Image (cartoon, rainbow, N blue to C red):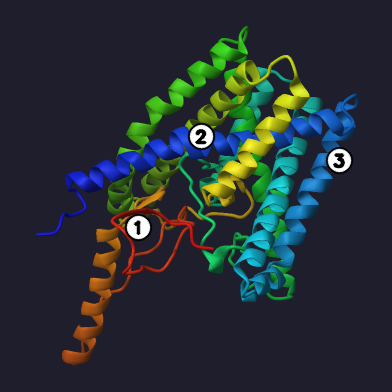
Amino acid sequence: MEPGPNSCRCVLISMANALINLAIVSPLVVCFWRGTWELMDVYLFPDDFELTAWISVAIGNAIIFLFSIFQGYFSNLNKIKNPFIYFVFSRLHIYLLGFGCVNQWRGVWFLQDHYTGKTWQSATGSTIIGVSVLSCMRCLSGIIASPLLLCRDNDKEDMFVVTRRFSSEAVPSVKFVLDVCLTVFGINNLVVFFWRGSWSLLDLFLFPDSITVSGAYSFIISFCLALPVLLGQHGVQRLSQYFHKRAFLLQFLVEDTFLMVAGFLAVCHWRGAWFLQNGFLLPDNKVLSVWVSHTVGSVGLVVLFSSRSYLTSGCFMDTTIHKMESPTFDIQFLRWKQERFSENLDRYNEVESKVDIPGSDGDSSPPESPFECDASPPESSISPLEIDTRL
């Protein structure tokens, strides 16, 4: 008998995936963000806080808007036959879009600091506004980031896609442009509200006199929350399914509370990794420190084929959680051969049932997770454990 999804091997692989994301991929994502963010602090009008914030807002929103509008044209890069040329252009696309994401967040964050101050009232208000509006729009999933989000670079179909709130077709039309504007200038910026508010509250109340100690405790909190969040996602899905037709308000309450806890986990993890770099990575030479951080994060994620994990553009919907059969947080860095073999077998049986049994409706495939970014087709020639590095 083949091992099932609850077998010891499956559990070990799931644990390994969680550790890889928590200890390797996510810190590299933070390296990219810290390096890029603080390079702008060094070189982009460092003596004028308001001006540098507004320029970052302009740069970030313009890049994300243009990349969203022209995503249909960028998808033509998938027709490139030379794997090396495709690799270079696709990773350059990810890098530039990531640069835009960092600038968008930096600008919105700094403008709030400048105009509302760095007080607990400002931080609390920022968090409440972000959560409440995103929840009403059913886009609270946007606050989720690495280590609960893993996007691989080997999925050509989604390589140049920037998702939108209403999933309008990426063709020249008023509807598409309005959908992009709502996502880029509205939803993406509201996500920053939640992160800035949560982060600032930790700055104010979690050992504010020492960034190193504060960062260490923030990192510990994220690891402590990781286990109940990753294990609890299956229970949340069942509760959501139970309340779906009985009490939809309770369904939303359960889902949104869970997403807020998961978002807070991500904030703690990023803050811990960021502050520990500030404290231990060449603290006496900030310029060299941020250059090292930027380079290590950029190159490391390209090597791991996970550079899309540092992107925050796009929009995820919350309304599919109760429909899921797969995990809410798909962070499979390592793939298990048996899972793909089972998928092939299920598809084969489905085809056979349709051919041999007249009137059979077949089985519909389970809905995908809104956080699933790697949808590579199964292959029959892979090893039991592999790191997928196809271009």
Which label number is shown at residue 266?
A: 2
Secondary structure category for the residue under label 2: helix
Q: Is residue 362 in view? A: no
The residue that disc 1 covers is: 324
Tag 1: amino acid:
Met
Tag 1–tag 3 contact (CB < 8 Å): no
Badge 1 crowding class, 10 Å Cα cut-off, few under 14, some 14 to 19, many 20 or more, is some
Residue for point 67% across, 38% down: 295
Which label number is shown at residue 165?
A: none
Toward the left, the furthest residue is 1
Tag 2: amino acid:
Ala
Q: Which is more N-terminal, label 2 or label 3?
A: 3
Marker count (numbered): 3
Badge 3 crowding class, 10 Å Cα cut-off, few under 14, some 14 to 19, many 20 or more, is some
Which quadrant of the rendered structure holds the C terminus?
bottom right
Name the spot of residue 229 as percent of width and height, x first. 37, 36
**Rendered view: 371 above or below 109:** below
Name the spot of residue 77 as percent of width and height, x first. 67, 71
**Rendered view: 25 above or below 95:** above
Where residue 275 sits, quadrant-wise, is top right
The residue that disc 3 covers is: 55
